[in-house]
């Protein structure tokens, strides 16, 4: 299993506090059936910088320690980039780290807002050969209230990643229901942990896949898992034609 979004690197954001916690997270990941993790520290969120080369160096250091500890987990470099108007300049300056050097870039909105310039920025990113992957859209209040926003982004080439814990209901019933609606409308393409620790923000990947399998069957599981593999290979992912979330269904979650 591949986890495309995880804060496992020690001491550089609000994820693992130190190397011992990173090692504990790695052991837990292996228990979950995860063999590959993309380390995605925050970039330009709450004063976290974490430029590309620093992430690459820290991933290399962590992989060496995991080898010494005989933990069968491979960590790849990535980054969770808070959306900002100068993303292309950041990429060209070598500060932004796409997933393992592929064309896929994880993009984070604030929990309450989607900037008005997002559509234009996503277009410009795609013109540069980059593919924006919107992380945890199911937890963004503006998207919950107006899912047409997300539909338009996906229709125009963006991808999205839902958090495993959202599917499991850890963020509440509303967010769980909305996550299911995004899956049903083909408005999300990946499940990832967004794990920060082993207490209140852990992996939940096995549980999430179990719930998806029970509700949607093996084909949906295969799509999500295959898409994660395709991303780290730098290949095109499977995408169904997106649909709009039905407003009458959405109102039912409030």
Image: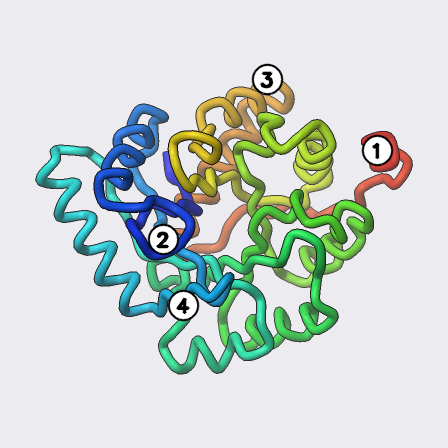
Disc number at residue 117?
A: none
Q: CA distance from mark 3 to mark 2?
A: 28 Å
Would you identify the image quadrant in which residue 177 lies?
top right
Q: Residue at x 43, y 64 (%)?
A: 48
**Left or right of residue 15: residue 238:** right
Q: Residue at x 44, y 44 (%)?
A: 228
Q: Which element carries disc 4, helix, strand or loop?
A: loop
Sequence-wise first label, 3 or 2: 3
- Which one is closest to the eye, mark 1 or mark 2? 1
Give the image location of residue 2, x and y in percent.
38, 39
Q: Which residue is mark 1?
A: 254
Q: Which residue is mark 4?
A: 49
Give the image location of residue 75, x and y in percent.
27, 47
Q: Which residue is mark 2?
A: 233
Colour convention of the picture: rainbow
Q: CA distance from mark 4 to mark 1?
A: 37 Å
Residue neighbourhood size for the residue with mark 2, other residues' Cα within 10 Å, grouped as few (<14), some (14–19), many (≥20): some
Circles 2 and 4: CB atoms closer than 8 Å: no
Sequence-wise first label, 1 or 2: 2
Circles 1 and 2: CB atoms closer than 8 Å: no
Q: Which residue is mark 3?
A: 214
Comparing 96 with 9, the one in front is 9
Q: Quadrant where the C terminus lies?
A: top right
Give the image location of residue 174, x and y in percent.
74, 32
């Amino acid at each position: 299993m591949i986890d495309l979004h995880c804060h496992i690197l020690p001491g550089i954001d609000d994820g693992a506090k130190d190397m011992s916690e990173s090692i504990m997270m790695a052991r837990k990941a292996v228990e979950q059936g995860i063999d590959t993790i993309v380390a995605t520290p925050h970039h330009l969120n709450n004063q976290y910088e974490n430029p590309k080369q620093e992430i690459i160096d820290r991933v290399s250091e962590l992989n060496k320690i995991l080898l010494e500890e005989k933990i069968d987990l491979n960590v790849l470099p990535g980054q969770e980039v808070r959306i900002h108007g100068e993303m292309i300049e950041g990429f060209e300056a070598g500060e932004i780290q796409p997933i393992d050097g592929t064309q896929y870039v994880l993009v984070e909105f604030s929990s309450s807002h989607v900037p008005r310039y997002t559509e234009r920025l996503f277009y410009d990113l795609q013109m540069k050969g980059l593919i924006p992957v919107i992380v945890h859209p199911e937890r963004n209040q503006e998207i919950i209230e107006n899912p047409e926003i997300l539909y338009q982004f996906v229709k125009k080439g963006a991808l999205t990643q839902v958090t495993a814990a959202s599917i499991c209901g850890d963020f509440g019933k509303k967010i769980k229901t909305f996550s299911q609606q995004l899956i049903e409308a083909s408005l999300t393409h990946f499940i990832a942990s967004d794990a920060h620790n082993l207490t209140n923000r852990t992996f939940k990947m096995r549980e999430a896949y179990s719930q998806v399998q029970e509700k949607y069957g093996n084909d949906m599981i295969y799509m999500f898992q295959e898409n994660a593999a395709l991303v780290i290979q730098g290949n095109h992912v499977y995408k169904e034609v997106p649909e709009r979330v039905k407003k009458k269904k959405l109102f039912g979650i409030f």
